[in-house]
């Protein structure tokens, strides 16, 4: 049985039928999200009645740890321990069932939303193919030429398959969730189920305050006794007669509650802070000072390597202990770096007195990585902790690959992922300005990033990229967040002025194997020797490309160049800086940054495609008369392309030096960039260009696939290299309003009709023309329009085009000439 409807929030939507095409989906579940949520609330109301509370429940008992007798409002002072235990069990069971019901309501809600999105997308796109689907076959057509009806049928079939596949994935996820939650209800509140509910935000202090399996909480539990219980458990896990999950639940709950408090401007209570500090001090003492590893790290090793401990309990303990350490160090929660045990601080501060990291430090750091890497991903350490750890890792990795042969990527990734969560620390390292400094290295961004960027990461640099990813992720943040990000970006770009830094990233000492295009245009196996950081760690390069896309207007600025209204005579540069809220990027730093980012094919293609899209946006602004005939946008486009031309040329030359078979890198990048932009435009079935811009930017990120591109693939692209004149003509024709009488004079096949409107699509693949005739049709259409009066000035369309394209080309050529001279 299948269906093509969805009922969500009281509204029923049905998928339309286009000819014989419609969606065949799994049956829409008959359950209502609102009724599930009402059921959860009914359980909570019963819970309130049992507890004798007519007032609210969650805010009171979730805010901090409480004894059960504080939570309940009835007078239960005369109850025996057995009766009180029953009352506690019932209350905690109700809270558990309410949380499970809330989670199931969210699962159903997510599926319903996804099903509605799928049907809405079908209803939005499928009707655009109806007219073509109903067209009769023409009397004559070339061999293998598809009719409009065949094209429409193919498009509908592909859309149907894609959307039905997405629905199957969503339905399977819903089914798997239902099985998991059914098992939870059958088995009761196991530690694993309770921990999942905590992690997903359905339960905080409430379960423990209402009893559950826990007899006491941090405020009431003596921290030294808690440490003793853990040691006793580690000495004999199978013979231990207590419940060690009580301790792991307490520690995890403190960490998760701390995340919530931090997000809402709160802090730890003094009781929570004292509990954590004294608990870890007791563990440090139990682990001993003279051994290897010492203190808390010794206890951590005992948890990791004791095979009598169940895996689930092991992970809960590591998560709780690791998360508690991070919370204890966080100044914003009234924590403090000096609260941390000595064994942790000495490891965080790194291999200070060694030319290379000692075996002892590496072993301790690996243990710390396993511990902190197990903590909840939303928990972060304090600024001083993060400043120290990030720079210690940079120092340890700074040097040739031979100097750290035993540094394992898995624990390094865990540590750098944790240390770069604190954005204040990242900002301090990058700018050299912060409250805290490393005891030996101070705030040394060049040393730190040189070490992090030149290591061969197992995750291809994804975790290390966190030191700058926060910058582009804050582009939509509050004003102070955007200002902070710009400060960090200016300082980060300043590193690319340093020859030592640029040289280190240009040649990391690592070799990389992959596919190259030889002089015959064939893809063959190859090896790049002394590869660049971007080639070694493509996730780093992708993060850099995101920085470029975020600050593309600053990259296109005439600042520091003898061009445009912001230009200055060559040589009068003032570095990258933030001034009066405006970010200025030094041109030499821009060029060096772009060359290094171009080292990865996907990142290079994304940068190239973004620059093409930027050029088209500026043309579109000019065509629509946004600034009259001001050529500022043309100059910006020329600056951007001139910088990218040079960067790509230098990277292509460097690649050929490091692998003489890699002959066509530049052509592959430009081809893939063109493909990305063309694909992005074709994904959005609307006329004109200005309406496409944001959707194009999203699609560009999702479509990169450099290794699948052959060098000669786009040499006969219908619009050449998407250069200024072709783009100007295409976008001008696309800007003609539907119904413009001049459309009648355009070449047959260029003008398409969609939803009752006639227009020229900016995507030539929409034109109903014999393949290969697109350029001829574009020339003919422009000839028809070019002598018409330009609507935004005293000139014709051709004059307007020449004004824009000459400003663009002159700027681009000027930059290329200056680069060649330098």
Image (spheres, helix red, strand yellow):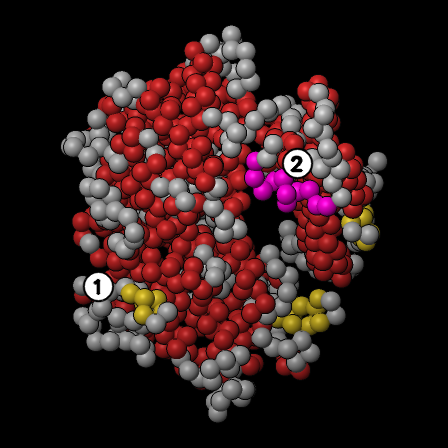
Q: At 62% across and 23% down in the image, what residue appears?
A: 213
**Is residue 63 inside the magenta stretch?**
yes
Q: Position of residue 48 (x, y in %)?
A: 75, 38
Q: Secondary structure at mark 2?
A: helix
Q: Looking at the image, which is closer to me, 223 or 423?
A: 223
Count every numbered label the image shows and give the total: 2
Q: Is residue 404 above or below residue 242?
A: below
**Residue 12 appears in view:** yes
Q: Which residue is mark 2?
A: 71
* Residue lying at 24% horizontally and 65% vertically, measured from the top left: 575
Q: Is residue 529 left or right of residue 193?
A: left
> Which label was assigned to residue 820?
1
* Relative horizontal placement of residue 324, taking residue 685 as reference (left or right): left
- The region drawn magenta spans 55-65
- Residue 447: say if magenta: no
In percent of the image, x 56 and y 26: which residue is there?
216
Give left or right: position of 730 versus 522: right
Work out whether residue 721 or residue 480 is closer to the camera in this orientation and state it. 480
């Amino acid at each position: 049985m299948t269906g093509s409807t969805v009922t969500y929030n009281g509204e029923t939507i049905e998928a339309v039928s286009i000819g014989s095409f419609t969606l065949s989906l799994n049956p829409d579940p008959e359950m209502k999200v609102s009724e599930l949520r009402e059921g959860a609330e009914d359980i909570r109301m019963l819970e309130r009645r049992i507890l004798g509370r007519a007032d609210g429940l969650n805010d009171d008992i979730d805010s901090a740890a409480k004894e059960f007798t504080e939570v309940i409002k009835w007078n239960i002072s005369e109850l025996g321990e057995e009766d009180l235990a029953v009352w506690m069990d019932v209350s905690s069971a109700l809270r558990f069932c309410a949380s499970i019901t809330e989670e199931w309501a969210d699962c159903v809600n997510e599926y319903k939303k996804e099903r509605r999105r799928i049907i809405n997308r079908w209803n939005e796109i499928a009707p655009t193919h109806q007219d073509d689907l109903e067209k009769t076959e023409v009397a004559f057509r070339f061999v293998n030429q598809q009719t409009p009806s065949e094209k429409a049928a193919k498009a509908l079939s592909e859309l149907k398959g894609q959307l039905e596949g997405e629905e199957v994935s969503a339905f399977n996820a819903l089914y798997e969730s239902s099985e998991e939650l059914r098992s939870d209800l059958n088995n009761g509140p196991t530690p694993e189920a309770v921990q999942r509910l905590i992690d997903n935000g359905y339960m905080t202090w409430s379960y423990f305050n209402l009893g559950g399996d826990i007899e006491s909480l941090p405020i009431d539990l003596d921290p030294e006794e808690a440490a003793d219980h853990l040691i006793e458990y580690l000495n004999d896990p199978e013979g231990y007669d207590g419940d060690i999950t009580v301790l792991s639940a307490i520690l995890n709950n403190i960490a998760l509650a701390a995340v919530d408090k931090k997000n809402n401007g709160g802090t730890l209570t003094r009781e929570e802070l004292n509990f954590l500090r004294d608990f870890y001090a007791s563990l440090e003492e139990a682990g001993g000072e003279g051994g290897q590893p010492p203190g808390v790290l010794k206890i951590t090793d005992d948890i990791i390597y004791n095979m009598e401990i169940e895996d689930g309990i092991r992970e809960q303990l590591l998560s709780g202990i690791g998360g508690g350490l991070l919370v204890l160090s966080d100044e914003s929660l009234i924590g403090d770096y000096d609260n941390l045990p000595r064994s942790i601080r000495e490891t965080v501060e790194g291999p200070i007195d060694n030319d290379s990291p000692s075996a002892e430090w590496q072993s301790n750091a690996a243990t710390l990585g396993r511990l902190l890497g197990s903590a909840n991903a939303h928990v972060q350490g304090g600024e001083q902790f993060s400043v120290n750890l990030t720079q210690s890792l940079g120092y340890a990795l700074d040097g040739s690959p031979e100097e750290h042969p035993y540094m394992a990527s898995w624990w390094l990734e865990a540590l750098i992922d944790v240390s770069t969560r604190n954005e204040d620390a990242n900002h301090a390292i990058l700018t050299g300005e912060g409250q805290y400094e490393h005891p030996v290295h101070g705030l040394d961004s060049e040393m730190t990033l040189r070490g992090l960027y030149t290591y061969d990461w197992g995750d291809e640099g994804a975790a290390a990229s966190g030191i700058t990813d926060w910058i582009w992720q804050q582009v939509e943040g509050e004003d102070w967040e955007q200002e902070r990000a710009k400060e960090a970006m200016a300082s980060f770009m300043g590193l690319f002025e340093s020859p030592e830094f640029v040289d280190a990233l240009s040649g990391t000492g690592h070799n990389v194997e992959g596919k190259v295009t030889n002089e015959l245009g064939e893809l063959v196996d190859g090896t790049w020797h002394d590869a660049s950081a971007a080639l070694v760690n493509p996730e780093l390069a992708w993060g850099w490309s995101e920085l470029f896309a975020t600050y593309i207007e600053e990259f296109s600025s005439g600042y520091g160049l003898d061009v445009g209204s912001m230009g200055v005579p060559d040589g009068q540069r003032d570095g990258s800086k933030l001034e009066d809220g405006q970010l200025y990027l030094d041109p030499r730093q821009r060029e060096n940054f772009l060359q290094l980012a171009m080292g990865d094919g996907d990142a290079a293609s994304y940068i190239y495609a973004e620059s093409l899209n930027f050029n088209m946006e500026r043309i579109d602004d000019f065509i629509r008369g946004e600034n009259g005939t001001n050529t500022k946008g043309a100059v910006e486009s020329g600056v951007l392309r001139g910088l990218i031309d040079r960067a790509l040329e230098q990277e292509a030359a460097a690649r050929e030096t490091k692998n003489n078979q890699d002959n066509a890198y530049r052509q592959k990048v430009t081809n893939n960039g063109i493909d990305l932009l063309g694909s992005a435009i074709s994904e959005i079935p609307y006329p004109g260009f200005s309406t496409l811009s944001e959707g194009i930017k999203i699609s560009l990120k999702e479509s990169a696939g450099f290794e699948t591109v052959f060098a000669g693939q786009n040499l006969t692209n219908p619009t050449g290299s998407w250069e200024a004149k072709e783009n100007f003509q295409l976008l001008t024709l696309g800007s003609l309003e539907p119904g413009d009488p001049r459309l009648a004079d355009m070449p047959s096949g260029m003008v398409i009709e969609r939803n009752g409107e006639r227009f020229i699509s900016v995507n030539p693949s929409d034109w109903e023309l014999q393949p290969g005739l697109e350029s001829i049709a574009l020339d003919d259409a422009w000839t028809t329009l070019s002598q018409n009066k330009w609507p935004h000035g005293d000139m014709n369309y051709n004059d307007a085009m020449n004004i824009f394209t000459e400003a663009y080309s002159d700027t681009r050529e000027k930059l290329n000439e200056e680069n060649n001279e330098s």
